[in-house]
Amino acid sequence: EVQLVESGGDLVQPGGSLRLSCAASGFTFSGYSMNWVRQAPGKGPEWISYISSSGVSVHYADSVKGRFTISRDNAKNSLLLQMSSLRAEDTAVYYCARGASAAGFNWFDPWGQGTLVTVSS
Amino acid sequence: QSVLTQPPSVSGAPGQRVTISCTGSSSNIGAGLDVHWYQQLPGTAPKLLIYRNSNRPSGVPDRFSGSKSGTSASLAISGLQAEDEADYYCQSYDSSLSGFVFGNGTKVTVL
C-alpha cells in the first residue's frame, strides 16, 4: 500500500523554525517527484513546494520562497521541509503529496494525513 | 483570491446531477494545461478524483466525470449520494506563476 506519513508539526513562535518530515512507503520513492501542500484553517489547499525525483529541480510558491527549503533523501525514502522565519499566516496543516511521475506538471496522489503547524506567540 | 475560480457551493437531491465549474485563464487551463480534481471529506486529506481533465483513478465511481474546454473545466456528479457531501477542488499548473494552483473549492450539499 502506498503510504505517506508526515511528522514534525508543532506550535512555534513567530520568527521561529521547524522541520517537517514525510516518510514514504509502498512505492519506489526515487521514481517520483514530491510536493508539500498546506491548508490553512477553513481554506483550500495551497501548493508550496516541489522537488523532482532526483532532487535536482526544486520550486517554491512566492509565499514561502527564501524561507522554506525542500529536500529529499532517496536512500531513506524521506521528504523534508525546513521552515524558517515563520509567520502567523504559515499556520496550516501541511501535507506531503506524491507527483504522478519523476517530474512535470502533474497531479498529486496520494496525500499524507497531514501535520499541523501553528505559529503563535 | 484563487487563480482558479469555483462556485462556493452547489446542492442537489439524492439521485440528481450536479456540476462544478473551474474557471482559469490563458496562463493555466487556457494554455492547454491539464486540470485535476480532488474530493475532501471532513477532517481528511484531499483525495484524487479526476486526473488529466477526464480520467478516473481506479476505485472512483463512474458517477464522477470531468471535462475541459477553453479556459474552463467542469466536474459532474451524477446520481448524487449522501456520501458525496464534501469539498471539491480543481488544480492545474500556472505558467505565469511557475507553480501549481488550486481552485477556491466548492462545497457539495446533498439535500
Image: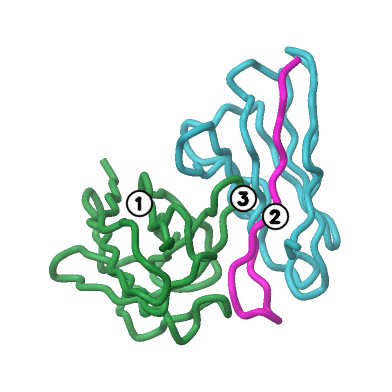
- In the rendering, at what x and y percent does residue A90 appear? 49, 65
**What residue type is disc 2 on?**
Gly
Task: Give residue A74's position: percent from left, percent from top.
Answer: 20, 71
Which chain, by letter, is cyan? Answer: B
Of the pair B51 and A95, the residue shown nearer to us: A95
Q: Disc 1 designates what residue? A: A115
* Circles 2 and 3: CB atoms closer than 8 Å: no
Residue type at the position of mark 3 = Lys
| Badge 3 element | loop
B81 vs B20: above or below: above
Which amino acid type is shown beneath numbered disc 1? Thr
Chain coloured green in the rendered structure: A
The image position of residue A68, as x and y in percent, is 40, 78
Q: Quadrant of residue B40?
A: top right
Q: Are marks 2 and 1 in contact (CB under 8 Å)?
A: no
Circles 2 and 3 on the same chain? no
**If the image is split into quadrants, where does the C terminus of chain A sit?**
bottom left
Q: Which residues are magenta?
A: B92-111
Q: Which residue is mark 3?
A: A43
Q: Which residue is mark 2?
A: B103
| Above or below, comparing residue A47 to residue B97 in the picture | above
- Direction left: furthest residue: A75
Residue neighbourhood size for the residue with mark 1, other residues' Cα within 10 Å, grouped as few (<14), some (14–19), many (≥20): many
- Helix, strand or loop at label 2? It is loop
Q: Nearer the viewer, residue A9 or B50?
A: A9
Q: In this rendering, which labeled residue sits more in front, label 2 or label 3?
A: 3
Position of the N terminus of chain A by quadrant: top left
